Image (cartoon, helix red, strand yellow):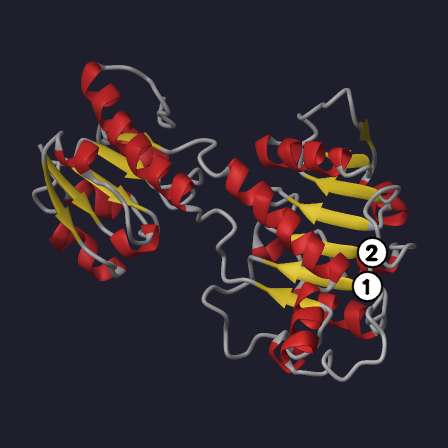
Amino acid sequence: MKIVLLDQKSLGEKLDFKKLESIGSVTYYNYTNQEQIIERCAEAEVVITNKGYFDEKTIGSLKHLKLICMTGTGYDKIDIQAAKSNKVGVCNVLDYCSNSVAQHTLALVLQLVNHMSYYERYVKSGKYIDDDAFTHYEVQINEIAQMTWGIVGMGSIGSKVAKIAESMGAKVIYYSTSGKNQQDIYKRVSFEDLLSRSQIITIHAPLNEQTKNLFSKAAFSKMKNTPILVNVGRGAIVNEEALVEALSHNRIAGVALDVLNNEPMSKNSKLIPILDDARLVITPHVAWASLTARQKVVDEVARNIIEYVKGNKYQRVDL
């Protein structure tokens, strides 16, 4: 079986591809531009992709193609109807990074609540050596216990974050963006209630018509407790211009973003002028990317191919 992996570099390094290579002959490319897909996949029976668009023209041009494997959950870049018409299977990978994203969420919340970077810089600057007190109180640390932690998106990741929040003594409320998820042990509220009641808000929702620009200027105006906001969902859920305005007018106490409207960060990003603001924390879309999670992606892609060959429906999204 001829297998082509179009964007190996998006998976990072130190991964074991033995399971994949045991299935067939694998050709690796670090990155693949849209214009290169047809040429590089001309002989492929299986294509593994993350960033490439597979529309009717692309799928129809690949005469040997039998299966497209996404290295993630989202498959909006694949024309599913075109795949069906050309008898090409499509698979994604589910629940591979929930632990990783939940852990990173906690790290970002703690950064905003405990101000670790500030205190680390204070000590390393040498100022602690000359201080006349054993404790430095310049930046206030707050306790998560007794805070209300609002979760936007109560799927697999949101559920794990809820458990973490609860274990730290927070009161958990949540807003289901799809309306489908129900967690009886936590209180489900409207979006407006979540905004007005929460001291911590973390976002774990997918990007769709219901969630795009969900955190708008109007949403920020409804926040009553000057909360901290953490987005590990998708960048466009938060309107960055409205976010900058909210931060500048102290409607939020701080914000941590692992996802942005444009990735890598755009030179025209509204966030660039405030990058030095201590209330803003940005990480480069790494919440999902623990070594364990990335290896699981590779192993699950290999399993998807094996299950497809057996005729099973495992993680098929075209059926």
Q: Nearer the viewer, residue 239 or 80?
A: 239
Furthest residue toward right:
224
Position above or below: 165 against 220: above
Q: Position of residue 155 (x, y in %)?
A: 61, 31
Compared across the picture, whether 215 is left or right of 87 comes to right
Label 2 sits on what residue type? Answer: Pro
Q: Within the image, what quadrant is residue 217 found in?
A: bottom right
Position above or below: 32 against 92: below
Give the number of the disc on residue 34. none
For label 2, count other residues whose C-alpha is less than 10 Å away and answer few (under 14), some (14-19) or many (20+): many
Q: Position of residue 313 (x, y in %)?
A: 33, 17
Give the number of the disc on residue 227. 2
Q: Position of residue 37 (x, y in %)?
A: 20, 53
Label 1 sits on what residue type? Answer: Ala
Proximity of marks 2 and 1: CB atoms separated by less than 8 Å? yes
From the image, which quarter does the C terminus lie in?
A: top left
- Residue identifier under label 1: 253
Position above or below: 220 against 170: below
Identify the element where label 2 is drawn.
Answer: loop
Q: Residue at x 80, y 30 (%)?
A: 188
